[in-house]
Image (cartoon, rainbow, N blue to C red):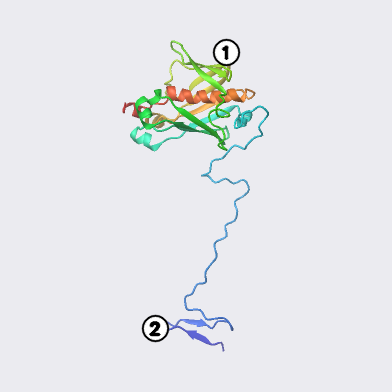
Amino acid sequence: MTPVYTTGLPSDMHSVYPAPPYGQPSLPPGYVPPQGPAVVPPPPLGYVSPQAPVMMPDPERPPGCPPGLEYLTQIDQLLVHQKMELIEAIFGWETNNQYIVKNTVGQQVFLAAEETDFCTRMVCGSMRSFVLHLQDNTGRLEVQAPPGSPVGYVMQNWHPYLPKFTIKNERGEAVLKIVGPFCDCNCCSDVNFEVMSLDEASVVGRISKQWTGMEAEMLTDADNFGVRFPMDLDVKIKAVILGACFLIDFMYFESSPKQDSHH
């Protein structure tokens, strides 16, 4: 018969434990051996955490392409999403604009962030001057490519009732025109700025301010844009058209009704 050990519990609780194997120390009643960390199986190949932004793969840079602009060699359309700031929606206090630039499949291509001081934003509003820092996914591109070497210019042209701009290359030579609508307050629809040839005879692209819904339009100035251009267009001019998108946002869509009530 196998010997047993009894605990020192009250007589009405007959807890009986078998003796430990020979050569092993006895364990106190209720002892639970420690367990190692749970083994979590690795995620499937290609899985990306939903919190992490999906980056566009780094393409090979062709000869003559400024570092950071090689992403644009494979793109004919960009989506520009301005980040919505809670303090703007609640109090109407203007914060530094921040944008995420993506391709058509939702992969992040660039990040853009405004640099201005609080007083300038609150006093000058959408008429303020600003510096916009543009970085690729490696953080190596900043506004110019490389810094100190402009890739082009956006010049506003006078017109009695239409917003017009000229896209120029790094040598100051006119390349394309941008023509906007007579009214930039289209309710429940997109507002389109056409990218056109120099003689304005043909449309080659578009900067479209997308309708984001009544609540978003009324409470905040966070906007979404779509930018289209020819696939074979010079990457420097593509970058200038993207810069024109930011300029158009500041000039025509920066103010919201809540912010206007504070001025």
Q: Residue furthest left?
A: 262
Residue 262, x across and y down, in percent: 31, 28
First in residue order: circle 1 vs circle 2: 2
Work out which quarter of the rendered image holds the N terminus and state it: bottom right
Q: Secondary structure at mark 1?
A: loop
Q: Nearer the viewer, mark 1 or mark 2?
A: 1
Name the residue rendered at 54%, 41% in the picture.
53
Q: Position of residue 116 (x, y in %)?
A: 42, 30
Q: Amino acid at mark 2?
A: Pro
The quarter in which the C terminus is drawn is top left
Residue topped by disc 1? 198
Mark 1 to mark 2: distance in Å? 99 Å
Task: Indicate the amino acid at tag 1.
Answer: Leu
* Residue bearing mark 2: 10
Which corner quadrant of the image does residue 19 belong to? bottom right
Q: Position of residue 124 (x, y in %)?
A: 37, 25
Image position of 78 with respect to 4: above or below: above
At label 1, counting other C-alpha atoms closer than 10 Å, the crowd grade (few under 14, some 14-19, many 20 or more) is: some
Residue 173: quarter of image: top right
Percent coordinates x, y for residue 135 in the rendering? 54, 34
Q: Nearer the viewer, residue 258 or 185?
A: 258
